[in-house]
Amino acid sequence: MKNDKILKMIENGETEELKKQLQDEIFQEKIKKEPDKKKRYLAMKRYFKYSPKEAPNAVKKPCKNLETEIGTYNAFIDNCSFVLTKEQLGEIEEFDNTKEKYFDIDNIIKSIPQEYKEIDLNLLISKAKSLGYKYKKSEIGYGSAFQFVFKYREGYYKIGILDKAYSIIQDEEKAKVYYTGNKSLLYIKTNIGLCGILPFNANKTGQTEKEKTVIVLNNDGEIEEQ
């Protein structure tokens, strides 16, 4: 942080905000030599970036050290996805679950099937970027302005929602992907944690291959040539 900005924040009495920003910079400096860890930290910081101001705290802040039936994780959740990660939250402001009740994560993850496919989701996101995809509000919002989609079996999913959730637990390996149907969560597991993303109803919202940029995965999770 530049000295003039620090002085300006002090003059404006923004000492608490200044402290938070400096602590965040110190944490990022600490993990600078671990680029994958830093990428995941930045993904955690952006997860709630576009949350509505009027949304409850549980969908604006992560819950630290949440105990679930599969272990203790730091949790993120919104209306379209959830993430469980072992990574440190650093200086991200946390949800206070001593004052408010958090979501029942065990109920959300109870439907994970036994069967999965190992899929290179890093390759999928790279493919989307090569076609013009960028992480922005329109790609993860609740409206119909999104452009980039992937199809797996009968389900259609926003690339933006995948990028938002999966990037928090992304590693260099193929992910284990658990398909539960075209109206249910698509679960994704890596060595870092677990996430899930909801599909959208392509027929109801009129989103078709003609209207959107759709990347199709075959049943083995490989990208089909277009």
Image (cartoon, rainbow, N blue to C red):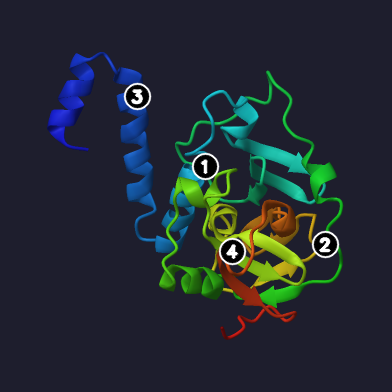
Q: Nearer the viewer, mark 4 or mark 1?
A: 4
Instruction: Pinpoint residue 32: horizontal percent, then vertical percent.
Output: 35, 56
> Given the image, on which type of amino acid does mark 4 rest?
Val
Closer to the camera in the image, 124 or 4? 124
Residue beneath disc 4: 149
Residue beneath disc 1: 89
Which sits earlier in the primary sequence, circle 1 or circle 2?
1
How far apart, in angstroms, are the residues tagged by discs 4 and 1? Answer: 29 Å
> Given the image, on which type of amino acid does mark 1 rest?
Leu
> Please, which residue is most extreme toward the bottom here?
225
Closer to the camera in the image, 215 or 169? 215
Say what secondary structure mark 3 lies in: helix
How far apart, in angstroms, are the residues tagged by discs 1 and 2? Answer: 30 Å
In this view, 136 is above or below 100: below
In this view, 224 is above or below 77: below
Which sits earlier in the primary sequence, circle 3 or circle 1?
3
Which sits earlier in the primary sequence, circle 4 or circle 2?
4
How far apart, in angstroms, are the residues tagged by discs 3 and 4? Answer: 37 Å
Residue 180 tag number = 2
Residue 17 tag number = 3
Crowd class of label 3 (few under 14; some 14 to 19; many from 20; radius 10 Å) = few
Q: Nearer the viewer, mark 3 or mark 4?
A: 4
